[in-house]
Amino acid sequence: MSAWIRPLIEMWRTKPKLTLVATADHVELTDSHLILGLKLAWSNQTNQDISVKEIRVGLFLHRRDKDPLRFYPLERFEREFGSRAFEKTPVSPFTLPANGIHTEELRFICQEIVDLPVGGYMVEVQVMDTNDASYSSRAIIELQGKIKYRRSVEWVEN
């Protein structure tokens, strides 16, 4: 077998069982944190449902030798038709159906404050199922100026 065929066979054997498509919906920068709203769609190519109990996101920054920015789930969101406003609900466990597609609209929070320039970014979404098996998928998201906004944190004294 020729040397150039071996990597192709190995890639076929290790084909991911869970693939991801991600779209950036909004980026919110405040004085204390960064919020990233993502529309996520997973394709579960296994014959078993995957019950997700934990999810994390890593965002890789250009020209940064550090680890990716770490984001943790904050809440689900749903856009109101024809508006920039959205309804928020708590994140709860969900299931990726066997041989099916599942979508989620989730907001993630990062305690590191970074102004993300417009452009393309690699995101890695890690999910852990109820059996503590971990799955990781990567996708490219595009940040456009119209989805970014700043918000000041207002302090209320009691």
Image: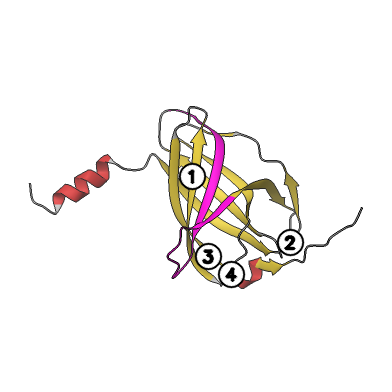
Q: Secondary structure at mark 4?
A: loop
Callout 4 crowding tier (Cα within 10 Å): few <14, some 14–19, many ≥20 = some
- Foreground: 58 or 85? 58
Closer to the chain start, of discs 1 and 4, is 1
Distance from disc 2 to disc 4, alpha carbons, whole Å, reads: 15 Å
Q: Does 21 sit above or below residue 135?
A: below
Q: Secondary structure at mark 3?
A: strand
Q: Mark 3 = which residue?
A: 142
Q: Mark 2 = which residue?
A: 84
Q: Does 125 sit above or below residue 62?
A: above
Q: Is residue 51 magenta?
A: yes
Q: Mark 1 = which residue?
A: 126
Disc 4 marks a residue whose amino acid type is Gln
Distance from disc 1 to disc 2, alpha carbons, whole Å, reads: 28 Å
Q: Is residue 81 magenta?
A: no
Q: Could you say where residue 87 lies in the image, as x and y percent from the top left?
A: 76, 49
